[in-house]
Image (cartoon, helix red, strand yellow):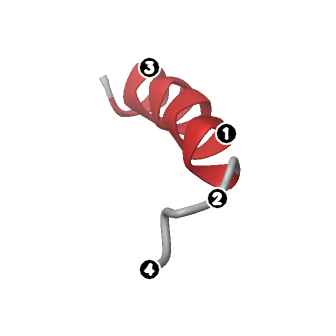
Amino acid sequence: MTVSSPANRNRRVHWRMVRDIFI
């Protein structure tokens, strides 16, 4: 997993959505 691009920021936003769904 390469998180050396702006995608890392997008991934963080996605994690928030996933967390909301997971919880």
13 vs 9, nearest the viewer: 9
Q: Residues within 10 Å of mark 4 (few under 14, many from 20)?
A: few
Q: Is residue 1 above or below residue 6?
A: below
Tell whether label 2 touches label 1 (CB within 8 Å).
Answer: no
Q: Residues within 10 Å of mark 2 (few under 14, many from 20)?
A: few
Cα gap from disc 4 to disc 3, whole angstroms = 23 Å
Q: Look at label 3 and name its amino acid.
A: Asp
Cα gap from disc 2 to disc 3, whole angstroms = 24 Å
* Residue 20 image label: 3
- Which residue in the protein does label 2 denote? 5
- Which residue in the protein does label 1 denote? 10
- Badge nearest the viewer, 1 or 2: 2
16 vs 23, nearest the viewer: 16
Tell whether label 1 touches label 4 (CB within 8 Å).
Answer: no
Q: Residue furthest bottom?
A: 1
Helix, strand or loop at label 4? It is: loop
Cα gap from disc 4 to disc 1, whole angstroms = 14 Å
Quadrant assignment, res 11? top right
Helix, strand or loop at label 1? It is: helix
Residue at screen point 59% across, 28% down: 13
In the image, taking residue 19 as reference, residue 6 lies left or right, namely right
